[in-house]
Image: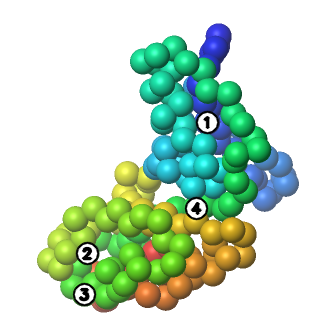
């Protein structure tokens, strides 16, 4: 591809039937849903966007100083719904923002009375919650606290349902 400076993003899928991993996509771009902009920085301390902008504007190539990077864990969790419906109750949305380790909560227009659609693909996420911690175990502990705190109920043809994780 002739990429002289930049970042790459690769996606793989694991197939249980044949116990193999398959390359789905590789491209000269950062990962979507804030992977390259937020999660990389949270996990390593390296600001990908700053390095790319500096290269484009000034022509400066950032050499990674591995001694200055840190070794953390970061993840995001999406909010989606398994059915079409109308939001009828929201609990814990403000509370999750105050959980230690929750870096950022970006919710798309979640309010009582809003019509939501069933999750079909990545465009069907109604928000992202970003979490950072020192270890994987700690990160998932924070995520579980978020899951226990946030409850968005929707009224569907099948009754009341909550968001899916």
Disc number lying in front (2 or 1): 1
Residue highlighted by disc 2: 85
Tell me the distance, in whole angstroms, between the alpha carbons under discs 3 and 4. Answer: 26 Å
Give the left or right position of residue 44, taking residue 129 as reference.
Answer: right
Q: Reply above or below: 86 against 128.
A: below
Using a 10 Å C-alpha cutoff, classify the residue at mark 4 as few (fewer than 14 neighbours), some (14 to 19) or many (20 or more): many
Disc number lying in front (4 or 2): 4
Q: Residue furthest top?
A: 2
Earlier residue among tags 1 and 3: 1
Quarter holding the N terminus is top right
Name the residue located 67 percent from the left edge and 76 percent from the top edge: 138
Residue highlighted by disc 1: 9
Badges 1 and 3: C-beta atoms under 8 Å apart?
no
Residue highlighted by disc 4: 75
Name the residue located 32 percent from the left edge and 80 percent from the top edge: 94
Viewer-nearest residue: 88 or 45: 45
Element under label 4? Answer: strand
Q: Residue furthest left?
A: 113
Name the residue located 47 percent from the left edge and 80 percent from the top edge: 99
Earlier residue among tags 4 and 1: 1
Viewer-nearest residue: 151 or 67: 67
Task: Count how many numbered circles sit on residues in the image.
Answer: 4
Earlier residue among tags 3 and 4: 4
Whole-percent x and y of residue 4? 64, 14
Disc number lying in front (4 or 1): 4
Element under label 2? Answer: strand
**Residue 89 circle label:** 3
Tell me the distance, in whole angstroms, between the alpha carbons under discs 4 and 2. Answer: 28 Å
Q: Place residue 61 in its image quadrant.
A: top right
């Amino acid at each position: 591809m002739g990429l002289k400076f930049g970042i790459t993003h690769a996606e793989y899928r694991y197939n249980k039937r044949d116990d193999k991993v398959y390359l789905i996509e590789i491209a000269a771009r950062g990962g979507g849903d804030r992977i390259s902009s937020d999660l990389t920085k949270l996990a390593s301390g390296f600001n990908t966007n700053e390095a790319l902008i500096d290269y484009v504007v000034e022509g400066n190539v950032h050499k990674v100083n591995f001694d200055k990077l840190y070794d953390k864990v970061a993840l995001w969790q999406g909010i989606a719904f398994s059915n079409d419906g109308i939001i009828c109750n929201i609990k814990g949305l403000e509370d999750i923002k105050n959980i230690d380790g929750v870096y950022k909560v970006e919710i798309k227009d979640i309010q009582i009375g809003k019509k939501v659609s069933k999750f079909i693909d990545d465009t069907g996420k109604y928000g992202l919650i970003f979490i950072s911690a020192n270890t994987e175990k700690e990160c998932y502990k924070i995520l579980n606290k978020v899951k226990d705190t946030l409850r968005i109920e929707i009224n569907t043809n099948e009754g009341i349902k909550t968001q899916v994780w």
